[in-house]
Image (spheres, rainbow, N blue to C red):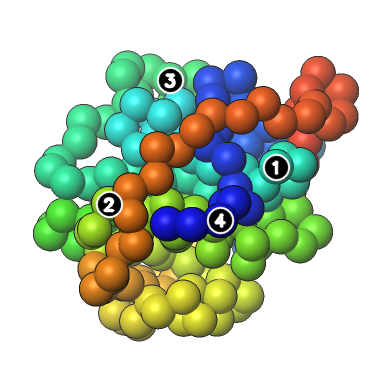
Amino acid sequence: MTGAMPVIRARWCDVGRIADLVAEALSPTALAAWLVPDAPRRSTVLAAVARIWIEHALLFGDAFLLPDGTAATVWFHRYRPIPPPRRYVDRLGAAAGPDVDRFRRLDDELAARRPVEPHNHLALLAAPGGGAAEALAGAQRRMDTLSLPTYAQVDDEPYGSLLRRLGYLDRGIFPAPDGTELRSMWRPTPAHPGGNDRWPVRRIGRRGRNGRAAGRATH
């Protein structure tokens, strides 16, 4: 692979930033309103739950950011079955509080649709005010170096069209527990992955108070 990539690999100190991107994006959606009916609590709960999965991805996958920290993708390397996050039941209960059963239902629905064959799983795409195409394309190039198919579960627009432009194929539509239609999408193993990038870690500039930023995401 040649040329500079438009994304950088996230580090542990970026978890809070990415969680905020996810929460800000998801908060206005119907799915988020179903997950956390109490609007004043919604963003805080979504960020806390997202943090569990982002931390897990740094152990069993990868997360990437645009250099300015305004968009991110979160991936799991599902070469084989991976365990749930450590102390997941307790941590999810603490993060979601009275809404924990709704998050469990969503977990079950997403897991039931996931392919069993080895793949890299795009779990979260967070793009606050633009940057989704750049964040996704840059991260996809990273994933292609691993010579495995990639999979995503997204609402159709705008993310479905972005994924199709990158070679993803539709594998079916299914309803989330709130009734939102989600689309399963699959990108076959690239014929020419184009080299083996070493994924250098670079420091990104801080934005916002306490180094946290906001954005948009889909799961």
Residue receiving disc 2: 146
Q: Which residue is mark 3?
A: 91
Q: Are marks 3 and 1 in contact (CB under 8 Å)?
A: no
Q: Amino acid at mark 3?
A: Arg
Q: Are marks 4 and 2 in contact (CB under 8 Å)?
A: no
Q: Earlier in the sequence, mark 1 or mark 4?
A: 4
- The residue at the point 38 percent across, 77 percent down is 168
Residue located farthest toward the right when viewing the structure as drawn: 209
Specify few, some or many for label 3: CA neighbours under 10 Å numbering under 14, 14-19, or 20 or more: some
Q: Earlier in the sequence, mark 4 or mark 2?
A: 4
Point out residue 119 in the picture as x, y percentages from the top left corner. 23, 56
Q: Give the Cα separation between the discs numbered 2 and 1.
A: 22 Å
Q: Secondary structure at mark 4?
A: loop
Report x, y in % for residue 14. 62, 27
Q: Residues within 10 Å of mark 4 (few under 14, many from 20)?
A: few
Q: CA distance from mark 3 to mark 1?
A: 30 Å
> Residue 184, position in %: x, y?
35, 72
- CA distance separating discs 4 and 3: 41 Å
Residue 158 higher or lower than 77, as above or below: below
Q: Which residue is mark 4?
A: 3
Q: In the rendered view of the protein, which quadrant contains the N terminus?
A: bottom left
Quadrant of res 167? bottom left
Of 159 and 94, nearer the camera is 159
Q: CA distance from mark 1 to mark 4?
A: 15 Å
Please tell me whether mark 3 or mark 1 is closer to you in this view. 1
Helix, strand or loop under label 1: loop
> Which residue in the protein does label 1 denote?
67
- Would you identify the image quadrant in which residue 59 lies? top left
Disc nearest the viewer among 3 and 2: 2
Which of the two marks, 4 or 2, is nearer to us in this view? 4
Q: Position of residue 205 (x, y in %)?
A: 78, 29
Q: CA distance from mark 4 to mark 2?
A: 18 Å
